[in-house]
Amino acid sequence: MHRFLATLVPLCFAVLFAGVLPRVAFAESVPPVGTWKLNVTKSTFNGQPPRSQTVAVQAEGQSLRLTIENVDAEGNSAKAIIINFDDGKFHPVRGPLYDAQADKVVNDSTAWIIRTKAGKVVQTLISEVSADGKTWTVTTVGVTPDGQQINNVLVREKQ
């Protein structure tokens, strides 16, 4: 199944980023503005799950600003800020796992994200918000710089 997804997802991204699907107002849809907390017990990780994670989502013009505060399994805190644009173009991102990200809203509840490192696709994400707007699930498939597989499902709940 994962091999099938690994083949299908890049193809779907190519179609989406070509502008075939209608545009949705990004800052109003996926994920909704607000504070989200990771439900570690409902989430799945390849490796050690974090102790906690909180994501604050803010609208900034036609983009979303995600401020992620993470406490890893050892208790170390880290903060990251990611700006999501709904234009299907790659924008630079600082970080060890990837250096650029492209975002595209598919519909009112789903966005797809591609992340690259030195021009090579290293992660694909599907971001989905439940019909009631209370759960935000992000499925990430990819590889770390040292070659470890990433196959995580993060379930976040609106606060």
Image: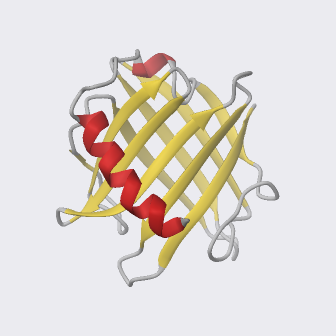
Residue 56, percent from left and from top: 58, 35
Question: Which image quadrant: the C terminus?
Answer: top right
Q: Residue at x 37, y 61 (%)?
A: 7
Residue 85, percent from left and from top: 32, 31
Q: From the viewer's perspective, is 153 left or right of 22?
A: right
Q: Give the image's coloring scheme.
A: secondary structure
Q: Residue furthest left?
A: 119
- Looking at the rendered structure, the number of numbered marks drawn on it comes to 0
Among the 4 quarters of the image, the one containing residue 134: top right
Camera-side residue: 37 or 130?
130
Question: Which image quadrant: the N terminus?
Answer: bottom right
Question: Against 79, is 30 above or below?
Answer: above
Residue 17, percent from left and from top: 26, 36
Q: From the viewer's perspective, is 49 left or right of 77?
A: right
Q: Residue at x 46, y 63 (%)?
A: 4
Camera-side residue: 18 or 158?
18
Camera-side residue: 18 or 140?
18
Q: Residue at x 67, y 75 (%)?
A: 48
Question: Against 135, is 119 above or below?
Answer: below
Q: Residue at x 33, y 53 (%)?
A: 10
Q: From the viewer's perspective, is 4 left or right of 152?
A: left
